[in-house]
Image (spheres, rainbow, N blue to C red):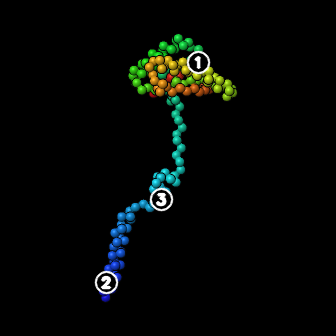
């Protein structure tokens, strides 16, 4: 009879030990691929396309059309840049050169190169002369079918 109780006690002890050890695991999630990477198995999200430099309706800070003499626009650009820097010292100047569309890619490349050399770079130099740091300049050139002559638009942010 003693063996029966010993055997029954051992069985009860094993059951109690199992219940004691398994109880904390009943509320756990099973280990799967998302344990280490929460995005595993989900389709990738496509990033939203970049917004254009100027939202529709947002006017440019300054606009300079090709053909305007540098003696005329230079002091005006420097004065406006100094005013903007006095109001916000870490302002970003986006200098965007815009040219009309061309018939061939080679003609478009040549037009954008000429625009950069003759108008965008001098405007940027005047902004730097006003006290802006080089990191505060974002220079771009592009073509636009709605414009009829080369120009530079300066946006601030």
Q: Label 3 vs label 2: CA separation? A: 43 Å
Query: What x and y, as percent, mark residue 68?
Result: 56, 14
In the foreground, 11 or 154: 11
Q: Which mark is residue 32?
A: 3
Q: CA distance from mark 1 to mark 2?
A: 102 Å
Q: Position of residue 11 (x, y in %)?
A: 35, 78
x and y percentages locating residue 25 in the rendered image: 38, 64
- Splitting the image into 4 quarters, where does residue 3 fall? bottom left
How many residues crowd around disc 3 within 10 Å: few (fewer than 14), some, or many (20 or more)? few
Q: From where the camera sits, is residue 14 visible?
A: yes
Residue drawn 52% across the image and 54% down it: 41
Apparent side of residue 10 relative to residue 111 in the rendered image (left or right): left
Q: Nearer the viewer, mark 1 or mark 2?
A: 2
Residue 99, label in figure: none
* 3 vs 2, front mark: 2
- The first of marks 3 and 1 along the sequence is 3
Q: Which residue is label 1 attached to?
A: 118
């Amino acid at each position: 009879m003693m063996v029966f109780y010993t055997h029954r006690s051992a069985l009860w002890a094993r059951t109690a030990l199992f219940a004691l050890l398994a109880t904390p695991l009943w509320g756990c999630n099973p280990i799967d691929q998302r344990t280490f990477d929460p995005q595993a198995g989900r389709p990738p999200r496509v990033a939203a396309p970049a917004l254009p430099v100027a939202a529709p309706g947002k006017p440019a800070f300054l606009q300079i059309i090709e053909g305007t003499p540098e003696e005329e626009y230079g002091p005006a650009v420097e004065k406006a840049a100094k005013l903007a820097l006095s109001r916000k010292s870490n302002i970003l100047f986006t200098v965007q050169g815009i040219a009309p569309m061309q018939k061939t890619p080679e003609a478009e490349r040549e037009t954008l190169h000429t625009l950069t050399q003759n108008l965008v770079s001098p405007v940027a130099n005047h902004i730097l002369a006003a006290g802006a740091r080089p990191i505060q300049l974002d220079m771009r050139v592009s073509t636009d079918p709605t414009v009829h002559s080369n120009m530079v638009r300066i946006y601030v942010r």
